[in-house]
Amino acid sequence: MKARTEPAASESDAAIRRRAAPDSAARPPLVRELLLVVGLFLVYKFGRLLANGHTGEALRNAHRVWDWERALRLPDEATVQSVLLHGDGLAQLANSYYAVVHFPATAAFLVWLYLRRPTHYVWARRVLAAVTAAALLLHLVFPLAPPRMLDGTGLVDTAQVYGPSVYAATPATDSLANQFAAMPSLHFGWALMVAIGLIAATRSRLRWLWLLHPLVTLLVIVGTANHYWLDAIGAAALLGLALAAIHLPHRTATTAGRAPELVKADEPVLVGAGR
């Protein structure tokens, strides 16, 4: 039997555009998301301030954490800091990274996911909210002074000595931040989530390089004596629990960044060729 050609009775142009574009149906309303993110940020800031003012308890906990790290044979934080103290420039660069990168990098990550990977955006926002809420609770029940406040460790407060600093010189007079919220480190927890989220949402062979962000963040928070190793380990543990409870969305061609292949509506196909 001779084959004949007929136009494919396929989907409309609008349907084709919907399939080729990211999954816009999964993207939450913009205004609602802006209000939600601003609300979460305010809860984060005020929650940290609620834990302020526990100087004695925070210093006692700091000595406990320092002793735990030595018992676990973790590297001395001074080893990392000694690299930064070879020159003013390295210390200032690390302080700037600590002060500047944390919030903008996380915000840029969420904005990109919202625009390009809306399904991953919802997942990442939920994970970050869960980690932050758990961290705030720990800040309240376990106030912890950073290692830069401990006497006898040989550590230098690099932000106060070399600048720039995001904290007041005296914690009691700091009305913008809680300096006794070292455990866990949200600097490290958020940076690790940014890397994991971008690795999950993209397909590039180079996507594993995003892990450099949490690695550099870890070296910065320890080298500037703003956090202990255990602060980062605690943040990673919280993130692991959140990721176990809040599952990654299905990886599809669209959500992974590759548009599906389409059959054009006006492309002729052979009918009856296999008969």
Image: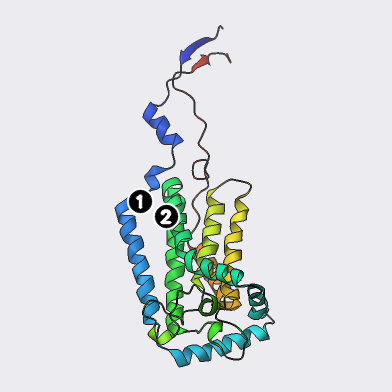
* Identity, as a three-letter code, of the amino acid under mark 2: Val
- Does the residue at mark 1 contact the one at mark 2 (Cβ under 8 Å)? yes
Question: Which residue lies under the disc numbered 1?
Answer: 28
Judging from the image, what secondary structure is the residue with disc 2 in? helix
Which residue is located at x 66 percent, y 77 percent?
A: 82
**Relative to residue 133, is residue 253 drawn left or right?**
right
Question: Which residue lies under the disc numbered 2?
Answer: 122
| Viewer-proximal residue among 66 and 2 | 66
Q: Position of residue 97 (x, y in %)?
A: 53, 66
Compared with 215, 209 (above or below) is above
Number of other residues with Cα within 10 Å of mark 2, as a class: few under 14, some 14 to 19, many 20 or more: some
* Identity, as a three-letter code, of the amino acid under mark 1: Pro
Q: CA distance from mark 1 to mark 2?
A: 8 Å
Picture quarter with the N terminus: top right
Number of other residues with Cα within 10 Å of mark 1, as a class: few under 14, some 14 to 19, many 20 or more: some
Q: Position of residue 6 (x, y in %)?
A: 46, 13
Compared with 67, 15 (above or below) is above
Q: Position of residue 92 (x, y in %)?
A: 55, 70
Q: Is residue 183 visible?
A: no
